[in-house]
Amino acid sequence: MLSRFMSGSIRNLDREYSCTVRLLDDSEYTCTIQRDAKGQYLFDLICHHLNLLEKDYFGIRYVDPDKQRHWLEFSKSIAKQMKCQPPFTMCLRVKFYPPEPAYLKEEITRYFVFLQIKRDLYHGRLLCKTSDAAMLAAHILQAEIGNYDPGKHPDGYSSKFQFFPKHSEKLERRISDIHKRELIGQTPETSERNFLQKAQMLETYGVDPHPCKDVSGNPAFLAFTPFGFVVLQGNKRVHFLKWNELTKLKFEGKTFHVYANQNEIILTYFAPTPEACKHLWKCGVENQAFYKLEKSSQVRTVSSSNLFFKGSRFRFSGRVAKEVMEQSAKIKREPPEIHRAGLVPSRSCPSITHGPRLTSVPRTRRRAVHISIMEGLESLRDSAHSTPVRSVSHGECFMPRSRSQATDASERTAVISDEAYSPSDSVLPTPVAEHSMELAVSRQVNGAPCSIEEEKESEAGTPMRGEVGDFGAQEGAGGDTALSEVEQVNKFVLSVLRLLLVTIGLLFVLLLLLIILTESDLDIAFLRDIRQTPEFQQFHHEYFCPLRRWFACKLRWVGGLLINKGE
């Protein structure tokens, strides 16, 4: 029996799992990994496959069966992190957004960041005005189809491409005009660099939104950017804390606390689930360590514990922003060849990989493109990585350029757009329509499907925003407030019960320790006084001695059984 169990364990250790990683260009990288392979092994395989050296900006993300997103931890076993059965499916994404992506060392790194931001634009995470959107889309066209050619690009050719969840004919004409007149002669590398320079100045660049609710039950999005901690509510940025102002992050259950300069709780939010709250906390710990610290040797293990409970412990592993910048400066090699997989001709008009027109894509690539479209909940990303951390003046790039500087800085509010910021909506109207405010189709905000089939089911069952809750004024405040009060009462009761249980447990442990000490041979005046009391003598003869004989008898019996079985 024992030998059979051991042989089974050996077979499990030798088992190989199939693992598929979806890359930023919607292609797939499939490999086999050992059961005990760590995340770093898989990440190194992918980076070697892509010829990528500045890899600290990227990470591997996966989704558990409960639709909760996670970043793969490189120091832990892959099989132990994945809660679903193999084969495993994951995605390579930008995890840490560079504050200045246009100035990354290598062109191939800039290209992959370009692909990620283009994805953000399509999925509604990078919100922008119409004028900015037209310029960004024109840069994408120039980078992926080259100069405007009347013979290949007839009137209305930009309408064949899907840059945003939805857009107007006026915007399409503006995109075509910029592409025809302003970008002629730009190489793909130049267009991508200009695209990155434009994108980094947008107020939602690098935002990795986590859906939460405040103490009043109002929906909000929490995010960690290269410049600090951000809270987006409605169509405004209601809170912004620079990294040097933020001191501590904690969570307990669904509750997330943010501490500022004097180690005082200044913000409290409630995540949808405890797992989502823990994920939010881990993202915050990673971001804080990466952007705030000077050296990775300064990284410390962070705990979410309080006075009575151990809580979760987490440690950021990897290089911090300053070290990444210094390491990138040392790269000296011939620029690797970049295989841009952006557009495929169809009726003399190309089709962008994110576009829904699958008929224009060759059969061999149709599945990869379909994957990109179905990845709707791409919004919940754990940001935390970058090159040089900007100065204070760069941190102000989140403030709107069109607003008067007379706005009171103490309010820390910045208008994002005329539309409520809702990055979980894969068809959010990005850019914001100048003439109307249309309700967008909303997706579930806690995670994403694990497989393509589940993604299709999620698409079919997509609720309207009104069903999920409009982040402006659609949601009834009274019901949310009552629900919040009930949650607060339940939380208080649970805290009291846990405190009572911990107190009883501590008293029980102290009692056992006292009994052990009094029954030992320690010759201490305090213990001698206890041993001479009638109560102790009675306890010793009536309870302790019989219990000790019973344990000794059981131990001898078990020892005899083991000896007989061995013979």
Image (cartoon, rainbow, N blue to C red):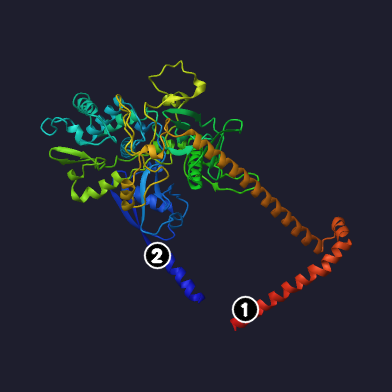
Work out which residue is located at the far bottom of the displayed protein and give it.
Answer: 567
Work out which residue is located at the far left of the displayed protein and give it.
Answer: 151
The answer, for residue 416, to whether it is visible in the render is: yes
Q: Position of residue 230 (x, y in %)?
A: 47, 32
Residue type highlighted by circle 1: Leu
**Which secondary structure, mark 2?**
loop
146 lies above or below 502: above
Q: Badge 2: few (under 14), some or many (20 or more) residues near its Cα, within 10 Å? A: few
| Numbered badge on residue 139 | none
198 lies above or below 557: above
Instruction: Name which residue lies at 25% across and 50% down.
Output: 367
Report which quarter residue 83 is drawn in: bottom left
Residue linked to disc 1: 562
Q: Position of residue 499 (x, y in %)?
A: 66, 48
Instruction: Name which residue lies at 10% across and 32% down.
Output: 151
- Residue nearer the viewer, 8 or 483: 483
